[in-house]
Structure formats: C-alpha cells, structure tokens
Image: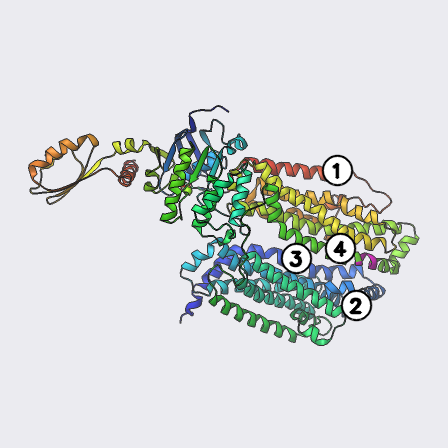
Amino acid sequence: MSAPAAVTGAPRLLRASLHHEARSFAPWIAIVTALSASSVLVYPWVFPTQADREGLATLVGSNPALGLIFGPAFDLSTADGFNAWRALALGGLFTALGAIFVVTRATRGQEDSGQAELLASGVLGRSSRLLTAVAMGLVMSVVVGVVSFLVAWACGGGVESTALLSATFTATGWMGTGIAAVTSQLGAEARASSSLAVATFGTLFILRGFAYSVEAADWAIWINPLAWMTETKPSVDNSWAPLGLAVALTAVTLAVAFVLQSRRDFGQGAIAPAPGPARGRTRSPFALALRLNRGSLIAWAVGFGVLGTVFGYFTTAITDLLSADEGIAQILAAGATTPEDLFGAFLATIISLVGIISSIACVQMVLRVRKEEMEDRVEPLIATPVSRPRYYAAHVGVALLAAPVFLTIAGLVIASFASGADIGVTFGEALGQALVTVPAVWTVVAVSIAVVGARPRLAIAAWAGVVISFALTLLGPTFGLDDWVLGISPYYHVPHLATSAYSWGGLAVVALVGALLCGVGFRGFRHRDLATS
Amino acid sequence: MPDTAQVIETQGLVKRFGRFTALDGLDLSVARGEVHGFLGPNGAGKSTTIRVLLGLLRANGGTARLLGGDPWSDVVELHQRLAYVPGDVALWPSMSGGEAIDLLGSLRGGLDDARRDELVERFELDPTKRGRQYSKGNRQKVAIVAALASNAELLILDEPTSGLDPLMENVFQEVLGEAKERGTTVLLSSHILSEVETLADRLSIIRAGRIVETGTLAQIRGNARTSVHATLTRTPAAADLAALHDVHLDGARLTATVDADGIGPAMSALAPYGLESLTVAPPSLESLFLRLYEDEGDAAGAR
Ligand SMILES: Nc1ncnc2c1ncn2[C@@H]1O[C@H](COP(=O)(O)OP(=O)(O)O)[C@@H](O)[C@H]1O
Ligand SMILES: [Mg+2]
C-alpha cells in the first residue's frame, strides 16, 4: 500500500513540524483554558446567591453592548450557563486565531522564508505541505478542546455542557483552519494571508453579536458559521447537531484550498500587491520602525477604540450590579468603604486590563527587532552610520509610545462613559487613571526590551512580564495571594485616582525597575554579536 | 582620525562561534585606493571577517583597524565613510526596491541622485517592485545600487555578484572600475577567481580562517607552477625529471608542473625523449587554488 503521490512525505513532515511548532500552540491553549476554567471557578464566588444571579441576568439582558462580544446569555443561573456565555465566543475566537496563525506560518510563512522551497524540492508530494499545515491547525484545535474540557471539568464544570463548550472551541478552530488554508492560497505573503483570515473571522464575530443583539431573523443567524456555535446552547439545550455544520464547512473550505493550491504558482498568491513608489520617503530608523509597525499600530488602535466601548458600557452597567448587591450595600452602610473607593478600584481594574492588553501589542513590536535581525535586515542598517543604540531606540521608542496612545484612546472612551454614569468618577479621573497606568505597561514592556537586547535566544521570555502581570492582576486576588506576591505585578502599584487615598511611591519604584530593565536591554544590544544566518 | 595608507589592517584576528573557530589568526591588509580581491572557498571565513570589520561581530582576539579607527568602538564615524553590500541581501517585504535604496542611502548621509538613477538604469532594475517580488539577483542589484550611488571612500562587497547574470556581471565590473577611478578603495570578496582577476590590484586568499597567500596577481602567479603536458616518443627515466614536479606518466604521455624559473631546464630534460606534442600553460588561479588546497590537505594529513 502506498500513499497517493500528492501527499508523499506528509506524515514525516507533520511529525517534524509538530516537534518544532508545538510550543507556539501553548499560549492559545492557555488563554482558552483559563477563560473557560476561570468562569467555573469564579462564578460561585462572585455570584453566591440566587439574587446575585438574577441580578447578573438582568444586567446582561439590559446591556446589548455585552452581547456584541459575548453573544446572548441563555442561562446565567448556573456556573455552566455562565461559562457558556462568557467563554463560548471568545474561546472559539482565540482557538481560531491560533489555528489561523499556525496554518499561515506553515504555508505562506515557509514560502516567504524560502524554507518551503527546500522542502518542496525534497521527496514531498505537491499537496504535502498544505496537508501538514492543515493537520497542525486541526490538531491544535483538538488539543485546545481537550485541555480546556479537562481543566474546566476538574474545576467543577458539568460533564456534558463543558464537553460541548470545549467542542465548540475545537469546531471553531477547525473552521479557522479551513479559512486560513484558503486565504493562504490567496494572499501574496504570509501577513496578507493571515490578515485576510483574521478579518473574515472578526467580521463574522461582530455580525454574530450584532444579529443576536438586535434579535435578527433566523436566517441572519443561521448563515453565520460562528452563530452555529452559539446555537449549540451548552448547558441549556446541549445540542450537538450544529457542530456537524462546522465540520462540513471545514471539509468544503479545505477542498477549495487544495484545488486553489494545485492551481497557483509557488510563492505567488491570487492577489498581487500593487507596485510601490520608485523613490522612498522613509529616511530614518524611527520612520522605518514606524512604517514596519504601521499596520499593527492602526489595527490595535481601532481595537482599543472597540475595547474602550465595551469596557465603558461595562462601567455604566456595574453601577446597577453593585447597587443591587446586598453584600455591598451592607459594607457601604457599615461605613467600611465608600462608593468612591469601590468605583475607583473598579475603574483601576478595568484600566489595568486595557494596560495588559496594550502590553501585548507593545511586546509584539519589541519582538519585531528580533524578527528583523533573524531575517538579516538589521545588518545592512547597522552597516550605515546608524549606531546600534539608535537602531534599537527607534523600535523601542515606537513600542513605548504606542502604550500611551492605546491607553489614551481606550481611556477617552471609558472616561466619557464613566463620567456620564453617575458613579462619582469624573472624566478627568478616568482619563487620568488610564495615563497613570502607562508606567506600569512600560515596565512590563521593558522585560521584553531586556530580553531582546541581552538574551535574544530566549525570545519567548519576552512575554514573561505580560503573563505574570496578567495572572497576578486577574487571577491573583481570587486565590487569596499575599500582598507582596500581588505586588510583583506593576499594575498593583498604580494609584487609584478616584479613591480617597492613594500614593505614588509604588509607581516610582515600578518606573525605576522599568528603567533598569531598559538599561540592561540597551547595554546587551550594544555589546552582543548580531545574529548571522 | 589619522589618514593612514592602510585602509584595512588586521593582525591575528580570531573569531570563535562557541567552540568553532571561524577566524584563526587572520592578517589582512588593504591599501588606500586599491581593489583588493578577497578569495576563498565557501565557509572559509570571508563573511565573518567582513562582519568583524563592520562591527557586527566582536573579535575574540587580534586587532583590526579600519580607516584608521576601531571597527567596534568607532562604528558611526567609520560607517559614514564606507558602504556595504551583504552576500545575502534581505529586503523589507512590503517596501519597494527604490524605497530601500533611498532608506539605506539617507541613513548613510545621502546619495548622489544622478548616479543613483543612472545605476538603476544600467542594472535594468525595476525600483517599484516590492521586496518580496525580487529574485535573488535583483535584490543584490538593489544593494549594489545603494552602495555604489553613495560617495563612500571604502566599499566592502561580500560576494556581490552572486545571482547576477553574466550581462549584469559585466555592468558590475564596469561600474566598479569607475569607482576605482574615483579613488574608492574596494574589498571584494568572492569564491570565483575570474570575477576578481580583471579588477583586483592585489589578492588575499583565505582558507579555514587564515590568509594563506597575499600579493599581486603576478606575484601569486609567480609563486605558482606552470603546467606542462607533453607526449614523448620514449618513456623518460625518472632520474632525468628532477626539474619537474607532480610528475604523472601514462606510458609516453607526461603531465607535470614546473617552477616559474624551471621552464628552461625542464625543456632541456624532456627534449632528448622526443617531443611529439607540448602544451605549457601559465598557472591559472584555479590551479593555484587547487595547489593551495592540496598543500593544506597534505599538511592536515601529515599531522
Ligand atoms: N553565527 C555563526 N554561528 C556559528 N558558526 C558560524 C556563524 N557564522 C559563521 N559560522 C561559521 O564560520 C565559518 C565561516 O563562515 P563565513 O564567514 O560565512 O564563510 P564564507 O567565507 O563562505 O563567507 C563557516 O564554517 C560557518 O559555518
Ligand atoms: Mg559568505
């Protein structure tokens, strides 16, 4: 028995690729699992009584903005129902994003780097590379589903609803794999291909939320593959049938991808980029860094506008929730805290979240330096009178400037919502809160500046700051960690401007640590060998 | 910075990558105004030498002087005076070739616009294509245009013509000749001897991280042996062939090499055996290369 010639060598290539790429699956698996398991864990703690749960349902029901992101809430009276509402949409989205990046990297990414040419000239069938890439996307999605199921189930989720919810993650990841397999044949380069797939998914995502929020007709829901996932209604209906539609769609898109692949030339896409200008206007390292990050700067800026809107709405909604909460009413009546302190702390928390997300964008920009270096594009620049510190400063500067820009965008939107919400938070306090969070973001980004500058081989460690601050800020308090542990996160030291008392001392220390890390990075970049291929 | 006669001067340069020694006591010197051919097989250490000279890598031992300065600490001052073409040119995927030329040019402090346009024309380069769309040869052209359109006093070219077709290689030779006339010093690395033969004033041959031979073409040729192919009527006696080296006898057919000053005695030794045909070829650089490798091989084998 022999495999069809078109896929010769695929199993061996898959094994080798999984060996090299499996590490890149980890963040997606972690994010989705954390999202799902945390809802099961947090639910009984945040909404202990029946009244709390009804309050939550009313709140969600009365706030269509939440539905835009999370989709409709079918049942918020159980932990499983809450999990289905909170994790289904975002968990599926993250799994699909992971699959899109894996597939794109293994197809167009390899072609761009020339790696594929070597492979293609070896004993490898015409379709083996695409088959391998697709298999990696499918496998990653399955792993996300299995891991998130096991963890959420271990945290107390019900078997069937948790299994179904996790299956929707996998199914969404499969559809992402299919779409990415097609867009990989269309775009002229890896970036164009993945952007096309991400944009397709993002549009479907928003359309789903919109269709449910405005209670659109059935057909508007059923033409959207992402809505099929919502229609499984884990913990309410536990309907598995819509998953079949997802599998069918995956099969169809994959078939299309293989046909397209057999018709296109190696290294070329269906959409050719337009000719560029014959003369250039990018004339300094900073202009170059800005230009290289332009696409992601714009995309993230728009993202922060949207995020600000969602969080802003949340600000207005939380008032109702808190004032309806008996426990909190009692605390307030006892004078243990004031409403200002409560809202101030709440505001600081959501803005810390914005900060954490913007640190992801900024660390990506710092890691860009490593990518440029590995792809031999730093060498010709350093061979001009541009000094290493100047080159590094250009990229680091763009990353560090991006933080206040993102926080200002989200801060302005949140501030306009918060100041109108009658929670005793002024516009200035809310915007100021966003601005005082900037040094904390800088310090998190400084970890990546130190890593890329001084220990570039450990590039993955560049994410350490983001991961640690995320875990401590979001999960730390619910685990009852000591203050000194929580204090490792820079966000812990951000003063809560809208509260009655706060201090600047902690933030000064945070800034100092950040400056030290930057120093380490610049010193390292100045003194080390540049990567040579 | 002192204006020394030697533009490049390294002594005992050592560069290690982990345990691997890429440069093993390299002595290279390039005089002002000369085109210096830097020849060696793949992996000999040409690019590594150049990267040390550019301050991209830090040497583990020895000294290097470039334009009278230190390549590691005087980076900015030195780089204002030189231009570099890497062996493997990577461009920014979304940037056009024209933009890349102007970026590199302005970082270097400006280009000669007229020369830039002329070079683009002569190399038949389409400057509006995006980085990703260029073939290897065309990426190479982008870097060559960017370097040669500057008014650098030193050009460091690392296998600049790899990927260029023969026509473009001719254009390159012409353009480099013009740069030489302007008084530019050039370090031209290559593993192809014919490429540097026409332009190089002096050559250095690198092998396994060391310079094994350096001098003008004539000097290097002078050291090399002439090759002799002869068909004789009788088989010669070994004792009569002392003036010849590397003797190989196949019946009456003889191939051998002789030292530059040994051609006369060799002919006298062969004449008595009746010469039916005779070819005497001057040493080509190829054969020189081969000889150097054999020597290396012998030395390695003897150890
Ligand atoms: N960054 C590196 N790490 C390890 N070995 C390297 C590195 N760069 C070059 N080398 C090794 O050093 C030797 C010389 O390489 P190089 O200078 O690129 O040779 P070439 O003469 O072909 O330009 C080669 O054996 C190469 O494998
Ligand atoms: Mg080389």
- CA distance for labels 1 and 2: 44 Å
Chief SS of the magenta region = helix
Q: Chain of mark 4?
A: A
**Which labelled disc corresponds to residue A31?**
3
Mark 2 sits on what residue? Answer: A77
At label 3, the amino acid type is: Ile
Q: Chain of mark 1?
A: A
Nearer-N-terminus badge (3/4): 3
Q: Secondary structure at mark 1?
A: helix
Q: Is residue A386 left or right of residue A479?
A: left
- CA distance for labels 3 and 4: 21 Å
Instruction: Report the residue at 81% width, 62% height from top.
Output: A48
Do callouts 1 and 2 point to residues on the same chain? yes
Q: Residues within 10 Å of mark 1 (few under 14, many from 20)?
A: some
Question: Closer to the camera: disc 1 or disc 3?
Answer: 1
At label 1, the amino acid type is: Ala
Expressed as whole percent of the image width and height from the top left, the position of residue B193 reads: 32, 41
Expressed as whole percent of the image width and height from the top left, the position of residue A86 reads: 73, 63
Q: Nearer the viewer, residue A245 or B2?
A: B2
Which contiguous range is marked in magenta?
Answer: A313-317
Expressed as whole percent of the image width and height from the top left, the position of residue A148 reads: 65, 62
Mark 4 sits on what residue? Answer: A308
Query: Measured along the vertical axis of the image, is residue A379 above or below residue B265?
Result: below
Whereabouts is ligand 1, in terms of quadrant?
top left
Q: Nearer the viewer, residue A32 or A385?
A: A385
